[in-house]
Amino acid sequence: MDPSGHCARAVASSFFLLMTNRMNRCLRPTLMTIALCAVLPLHAADAFADVPDRSPTELAAVRVQAQQAPAATTPSSSFGAASWKDTPASVNVLDRTLLDSRQVRTLSEVAANDASLGDSYAPVGYYQNIAIRGFALDTATGYRFNGLATTGEQRIALENIQQVEILKGEAGLAAGVMAPGGIINYVGKRTAEVRTVTLGTDSEGTRYTAVDVGHWLTPRFGVRVNAAWEDSASYIDHADGRRNFYSLAADWLIGERGKLEVDANYQTSAQRSASGFQLLGATELPRGVDRSKMLGYQPWQQPVGIASTNLTALHTFELGPRWQSRVSASHSRSVIDDNVAFAYGCYYAAQCADGSVPGNYFAPNGDYDIYDYRSPDDTRVNQELRAELRGSVDTGRVTHQLSIGADTFRRTVDKRQNVNEYVGTANIHDPQVPVFAPSPLQPGASVRRLDSRQDGLFVLDRMRFGDDWQWLAGGRMVRLDERAYDKRGNPERHSRISRFLPQTALIWNATDQVNVYVSYVRGISLGQEAPFWTSNDGEFLAPVLSRQLEVGIKYGATDALTLGAALFRTSQPFQYARADDSDAGYTFVQEGQQTHTGLELTANGHLTEQLQVTASASVLQARARDTATAAYEDHQLVNVPKTRASVHLDYALPFVAGMGVTGGWRYASSNTATVDGSVRAPSYSVVDLGLRYQHTLRQQPVTWRLSVDNVFDKFYWRDTGSSAGDYYLFAGAPRQARLSVTIAL
């Protein structure tokens, strides 16, 4: 019997048995099956060595599809669709090859591949947020799927993603009201002739299966289906979880000039969320902590459940050789059942009882309070409709590439009145967390908490003056109408804003390989909400205007390697809790300026035929000035390391066909953990290694991937970010090994 065939049949049988079971159950492939699949192909190769060559087989006729090659554009860019080199902004693209090589599954893991990105309150077991250039993204508008807004309060799956586009800096023309850091755009996979199944596990015992099937059903209509089932085993005790994901992409070529692309995906996940640490007595980092222990764990704590649905549709029509219309729409919905035994502060601890220690930090001896927090049916919905006309006209010796359009965006938030009750006090060094009784209270009825509508008109003109110069000028007229309501559904705030957000850029094509650009962009973002421990608890501050000036250079000698450098300066009003004589002791205000000045370097592509590199470095100074509070000035802002670097190498071994080795290095300098700069998390350096091997099984490719992150098991604080005005500390993951095999069927 052919052992390779036996392995293939075993895998195929497991897959088809799964599909006949209930769709909401996770596949549980055994490690024995994976191990046998690793050994049998090698044994089969020896077995076939003595078999004579088979007779030639006549292949079926090749059918040519009316497909268009994907353009090397950056649809997330605020400067229109253009090649990377002709985009006057810092843009990085993480393609499918890198995502597979690193076995990336979470947003935090995406951020680890670019030095300009960092975690910004990213707990294990919860939806995660990141910061770009030191600015936390707005979860309402900072995340995009196929260029359209998606709710950031979800665990975005990556199985159906072809590439992740990272636009750094202002993107007002693309997104309207948004945080100045940038946007993350997930680009979905399109129809292709593909049939693969991926099985995976890790050193904690995770069981993972993913399926990718695509086919052109007719020469003009094709579909692609992606699905994933995961039973995740976490390095944190009691934080194991599960996830089920399904997606469908369809491409319809309508006539000779029209095209319709539709994407739909649905995901459910359930996992206990791990609380972050806090400073001890507001002045000291916790020491000797065990990152595998879940703070505040209670047996009655239910997992956080997140169900998300994302739909996008894009219709393009070629009006002529130089003009195209684009109409797109999206619907994104995330429903969160938020349940956590939340470790927070020390208001009820003995060391904090006299008020000498701030109650919103852990006690000096490591005591912390535990709260029964429950907020089910937390529903966020984003909807967007966009119409755009792209084309070009010539006026004398100047060519104008125009983009004119309008869009409308609506976001709603519905929440039930939550339960947030103190149940007991524990200590970070407890061998086992004491068990307390949960609160008998129940959540209230669901009410509308936010209804935000945003309408915009935008125009961009890219003017080409011969072969050497390009001038881009445009902007967006944005109108925001937003209503906020309190926990009982009573009107609390009504904001109306109308602003024109201009932007311009000049590009010099210095040589065929080098472009130099300078750009200026203005943006607007909503004011932050005052924390509960300030005198103006719950108040939203006025919207803030931001400005960005950037100078950059891009080198692209060939498609194999690109190099980039960008120097930028972004400023906006500073928002912080100012100490005063109020009963609360603090009032949340806007005063002074927050300025981020930085340098970014990137290198992506092949250094040699065998060696591929994905590397970036960032040097960023983020400071506040003119705040009227001297302690908050002349030092780096919270959760913004001054220096970051990320390097990932992939080397194809020339002496072993199909085998490659990968290696990575991540570095971050010390990270400020308090608003007065008195406490810093130490710098850290993390090394990752991996191995890749590809062979054929019955003339179909099989790819094995082994990756080991944090090889030297280093302890470090990866995140000192804030949520609702409070600051938390999250430890980086310990050494983790992942193994996967992708089999083409």
Image (cartoon, rainbow, N blue to C red):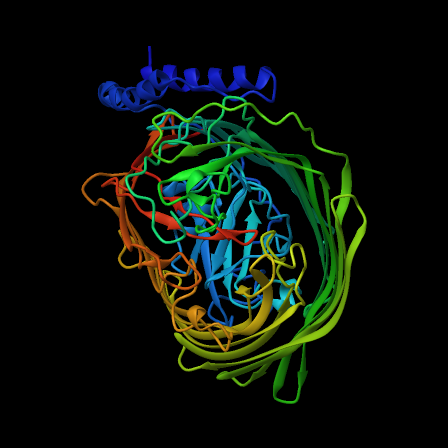
Classify residue 523 by image quadrant: bottom right
Q: Is residue 555 left or right of residue 212?
A: left
The answer to which of 173 and 135 lies nearer the viewer is 135
> Which of the 4 quarters of the picture holds residue 432?
top left
- Give the percent coordinates (x, y) of residue 221: 67, 41
User: Can the viewer see residue 336 in this picture?
Assistant: yes
Seen at 61% across and 51% down, the residue is 532
Q: Which residue is the extreme one toward the bottom?
A: 396
| Residue located at (57% from left, 51% from top) | 724
Q: Position of residue 576 (x, y in %)?
A: 54, 64
Q: How many marks?
A: 0
Q: Is residue 406 above or below residue 375?
A: below
Residue found 31% across the figure and 18% down from its top? 36
Farthest top residue in view: 1
**163 lies above or below 655:** below
Residue at the left extreme? Answer: 655
Q: Is residue 745 left or right of residue 533?
A: left
Residue drawn at x 21%, y 39% is 656
Which residue is at the front of the view, 239 or 442?
442
The spot of residue 31 in percent (x, y) is 35, 19
* Relative side of 116 to 320, left or right: left
